[in-house]
Image: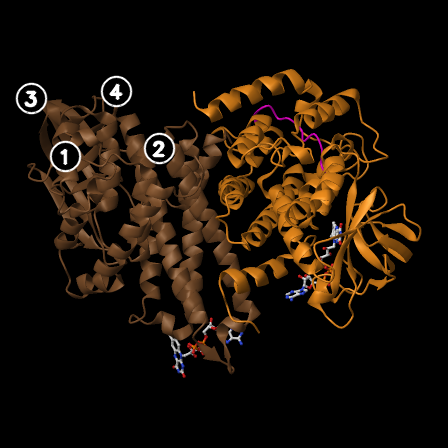
Chain colours: A brown, B orange
């Protein structure tokens, strides 16, 4: 497989890019923010996404989806990133689908069609502290009655307060088990907080939540592999969205360099700025290629995928961060104003960088996978 | 089985039968690289065998057409051949400026007769080429070059001097930029080919900070160059020169990904030791090496994407400038880490254990990566103007 978009993928991009740019440009985020919207995204927009089949892009055809791959999901995510579109696509359409499809069984049969048809929003309740440390899950699931009792606290749960179901990772006697916890489960509370990028993420408390045995996604104690699939998909997806954020910021900045005059010249004529812009371009291109490589390896089910996913999250993290920092700086004073969009890119980048492991976490993972 | 799978199987079998075990080792010293040419002395029988086997198959230049010494492979097949060679750590059978630079330019601009005449000996490793571009006053501003060819009817008489001519003292022929019209800057340069054994050509090695002298000053004193030995059009050599530079950059940028597949952290974990957690014992160096490894894996992905796009005409024409910039800066970073990981041992300049200071010399050599073939600053200028379309000063 060559490392560029084939004709079908290019066609998908040609339909998704203008759709997102028209229906959900940065002004869409602003209006949600300014109206202090309590959902965190637009249900109308999600319905439009559904009409295009997007929530089901990774859902197998047997479950009513499009049965496409991470490369295709990445195309959607890049446009979401470029337009800063608030959307549950990453957690629902990518992370949750990857876990459910990997696990199969009753929960897959129950939720995958609902995701594909746009009816269900799913949240991922993995992290428990301020940093992403999936190997330190302390939430417990103990056998009770004919099911389990869940106790613990989860943090940074995107869309947690509106999700129809949350995928909860918990410790069981012999390992990790994933549970599908429905919205109305007793003992489940989600306390949403607005983040720097205006999105909403919840602190979730599981106070003796009782679930039936069939809430288990996959098998008891065998959630590790499913969690890995969820993490790989979500991390790659977040990296793709970051490429979009970085690209959006870079494009804005390069355009600004061609418009703004100082000292009687366009500032884009100054070599000091040209070199920084060109360096940024190189970093963004490398990040893009890396994310595509991770998507390709995931789609092929290759052994090397895990390493490349961490490389992609780290590299996209570095490149997008450079893009937003250079963006604000090269805009000068105007870049500091709320009225101008570049600052919004900086905020979204920060949130995505933290989601599912920051640059340092993934650099450390690369070292570990290489045995040092 | 698809055609490509069948091809892969065939290549695998061929390599198994034809690549000698000695040629499946990483390159460790200068002599391990086979440059060919009239005066080439093979390091050992295996090096000779490996070259001959590849020549017979067209595998020194797999994607060139068969009449010119290639194997006529498609981009996909070429990629498979490279992957399979890499899989068994096969050394390149032949390294050559003819293959990397002149060949592509001839394929693009040469006449049919020139292609047959010049490409076959390149493919067979019989003629070693050097590149006569830079002059003492013309480096980054290459188009200001002054070496002049006076029109004498059926030949030119060339006078002037070149500098930084890599391996000029070992090369058989030179591809050379010569001014043939003083009134025109860009449209007054002709791309000429001539024998380094011609009367009036002399070379003088230049000692580098690495202690080696891989390149020379080159002097032309009334050198006669027959009129049939130019490529493209007379006075339009700049087009050929630029095209060739694209390929030169492609080649130089390859260094960034590193030769072997072992990550730098893995390499140094062995010598630096690990702590109780199995982590490399110096936490700061570990972090820097891991960050570097991330960039190498990422750059390799870019290399693959760049090649896939370049070979199918999808890449921006200036994207080789980006590859060159990113790759060479990365390679310099690698060698800084190699020195730091090596500690005092890496400083040894002439001991037997360090193979005559191979690491230190290698580190110093890489500083040229961001100079040769156009400096990093010039690459950034080109990216800014041609890709980002930023306004000119
Ligand atoms: C928080 C804040 C508080 C401020 N408070 C005050 C205040 O109290 N009073 C006041 O008068 N002003 C104030 N300023 C304005 C401040 O001094 C200007 O923002 C600053 O001088 C930059 O000018 P600019 O914003 O027009 O950027 P521009 O001049 O448009 O610069 C845009 C970009 O181009 C770069 N650039 C411009 N010229 C060159 C060049 N020749 N070579 C290379 N790069 C170049 C800049 O470095 C920048 O990155 C404030 C600004 C901020 C952000
Ligand atoms: C190891 C090695 C092998 C080489 N092999 C060959 C060969 O085989 N054949 C051959 O012809 N040449 C060869 N070269 C020459 C090489 O192409 C030149 O060194 C290179 O083009 C730079 O030119 P210069 O050395 O004159 O530097 P200069 O052009 O003098 O540059 C000096 C500094 O100024 C900067 N600078 C110059 N112009 C600009 C600008 N417009 N904007 C910003 N910064 C600028 C440069 O980036 C550099 O940092 C080789 C060089 C090396 C180091």
* Residue extent of the magenta highlight: B87-96
Q: Do tag 2 and tag 3 residues touch (Cβ < 8 Å)?
A: no
Q: CA distance from mark 4 to mark 1?
A: 31 Å
Q: Which residue is mark 3?
A: A145
Question: Is B215 on the left-hand or right-hand side of B199?
Answer: left
Which circle, 2 or 3, is nearer the viewer?
2
Q: CA distance from mark 3 to mark 1?
A: 29 Å
Say whether disc 3 or disc 1 marks the residue closer to the N-terminus. 1
Tell which of B215 and A86 is nearer to you: B215
Circle on res. A42 = none
Q: Chain of mark 2?
A: A
Which element carries disc 2, helix, strand or loop? helix
Query: Residue A77 in the image: x percent, y percent?
Result: 30, 48
Residue located farthest toward the right when viewing the structure as drawn: B199
Say whether disc 3 or disc 4 marks the residue closer to the N-terminus. 3
Quadrant of image for the C terminus of chain B:
bottom right
Tell which of B268 and B38 is nearer to you: B38
Same chain for the residues under marks 1 and 2 in the image: yes
Say whether disc 2 or disc 3 marks the residue closer to the N-terminus. 3
Ligand 1 positioned in quadrant: bottom left
Q: Chain of mark 4?
A: A
Circle on res. A113 = 1
Q: CA distance from mark 3 to mark 4?
A: 19 Å
Mark 2 neighbour density, 10 Å: few (under 14) some (14–19) many (20 or more): some
Which element carries disc 3, helix, strand or loop? loop
Circle on res. A299 = 2
Query: Residue B13 in the image: x percent, y percent?
Result: 58, 17
Q: Residue at x 20, y 42 (%)?
A: A55
Magenta includes B17?
no
Vertical comparison of B254 with B141: above or below? above
The image quarter in which residue A35 lies: bottom left
């Amino acid at each position: 497989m060559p490392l560029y978009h084939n004709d079908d993928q290019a066609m998908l991009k040609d339909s998704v890019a203008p759709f997102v740019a028209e229906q959900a440009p940065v002004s869409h985020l602003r209006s949600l923010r300014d109206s202090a919207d309590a959902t965190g995204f637009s249900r109308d927009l999600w319905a439009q996404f559904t009409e295009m089949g997007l929530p089901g892009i990774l859902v197998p055809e047997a479950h009513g989806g499009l049965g496409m791959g991470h490369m295709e999901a990445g195309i959607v995510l890049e446009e979401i990133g470029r337009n800063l579109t608030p959307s549950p696509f990453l957690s629902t359409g990518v992370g949750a689908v990857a876990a459910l499809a990997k696990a199969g069984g009753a929960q897959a049969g129950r939720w995958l069609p609902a995701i594909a048809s746009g009816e269900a929003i799913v949240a991922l309740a993995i992290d428990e502290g301020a940093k992403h440390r999936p190997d330190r899950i302390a939430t417990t699931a103990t056998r009770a009655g004919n099911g389990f009792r869940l106790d613990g606290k989860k943090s940074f749960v995107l869309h947690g307060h509106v999700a129809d179901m949350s995928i909860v990772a918990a410790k069981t006697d012999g390992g990790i088990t994933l549970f599908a916890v429905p919205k109305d489960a007793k003992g489940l509370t989600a306390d949403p907080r607005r983040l720097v990028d205006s999105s909403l993420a919840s602190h979730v408390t599981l106070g003796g939540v009782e679930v039936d045995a069939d809430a288990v996604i996959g098998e008891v104690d065998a959630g590790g592999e499913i969690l890995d699939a969820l993490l790989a998909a979500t991390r790659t997806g977040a990296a793709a969205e970051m490429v979009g954020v970085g690209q959006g910021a870079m494009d804005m900045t390069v355009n600004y360099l061609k418009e703004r005059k100082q000292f009687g010249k366009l500032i884009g004529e100054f070599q000091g700025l040209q070199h920084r812009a060109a360096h940024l371009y190189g970093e963004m291109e490398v990040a893009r290629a890396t994310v595509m490589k991770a998507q390709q390896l995931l789609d092929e089910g290759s052994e090397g995928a895990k390493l490349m996913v961490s490389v992609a999250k780290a590299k996209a993290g570095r490149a997008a961060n450079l893009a937003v920092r250079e963006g604000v700086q090269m805009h000068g004073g105007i870049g500091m104003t709320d009225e101008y969009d570049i600052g919004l890119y900086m905020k979204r980048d920060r949130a995505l960088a933290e989601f599912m492991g920051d640059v340092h976490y993934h650099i450390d993972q690369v070292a570990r996978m290489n045995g040092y | 089985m698809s055609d490509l799978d069948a091809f892969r199987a065939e290549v695998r079998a061929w390599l198994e039968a034809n690549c000698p075990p000695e040629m499946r080792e990483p390159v460790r010293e200068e002599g391990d690289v086979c440059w060919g040419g009239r005066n080439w002395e093979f390091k050992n029988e295996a090096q000779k065998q490996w070259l001959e086997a590849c020549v017979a198959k067209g595998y020194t230049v797999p994607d060139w057409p068969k009449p010119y010494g290639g194997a006529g492979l498609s981009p996909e097949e070429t990629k498979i051949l490279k992957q399979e060679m890499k899989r068994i750590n096969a050394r390149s059978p032949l390294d050559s400026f003819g293959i990397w630079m002149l060949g592509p330019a001839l394929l693009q601009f040469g006449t049919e007769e020139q292609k047959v005449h010049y490409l076959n000996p390149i493919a067979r490793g019989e003629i070693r080429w050097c590149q006569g571009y830079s002059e003492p006053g013309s480096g980054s501003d290459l188009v200001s070059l002054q070496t002049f060819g006076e029109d004498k009817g059926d030949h030119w008489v060339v006078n002037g001097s070149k500098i930084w001519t890599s391996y000029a003292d070992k090369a058989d022929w030179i591809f050379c930029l010569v001014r043939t019209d003083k009134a025109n800057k860009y449209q007054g340069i002709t791309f000429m080919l001539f024998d380094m054994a011609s009367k009036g050509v002399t070379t003088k090695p230049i000692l580098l900070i690495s202690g080696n002298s891989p390149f020379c000053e080159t002097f032309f004193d009334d050198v006669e160059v027959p009129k049939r030995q130019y490529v493209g059009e007379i006075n339009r050599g700049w087009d050929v020169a630029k095209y060739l530079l694209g390929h030169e950059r492609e080649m130089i940028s390859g260094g960034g990904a590193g030769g072997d597949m072992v990550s730098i952290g893995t390499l140094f974990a062995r010598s630096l030791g690990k702590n109780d957690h199995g982590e490399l014992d110096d936490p700061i160096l570990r972090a820097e090496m891991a960050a570097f490894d991330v960039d190498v894996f990422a750059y390799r992905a870019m290399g693959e994407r760049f090649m896939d796009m370049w070979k199918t005409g999808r890449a921006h024409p200036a994207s080789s400038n980006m590859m060159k910039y990113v790759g060479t800066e990365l390679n310099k970073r690698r060698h800084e880490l190699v020195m730091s990981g090596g500690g005092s041992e890496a400083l040894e300049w002439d001991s037997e254990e360090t193979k005559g200071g191979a690491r230190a010399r290698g580190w110093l050599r890489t500083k040229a990566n961001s100079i040769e073939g156009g400096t990093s600053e010039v690459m950034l200028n080109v990216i800014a103007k041609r890709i980002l379309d930023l306004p000119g000063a």
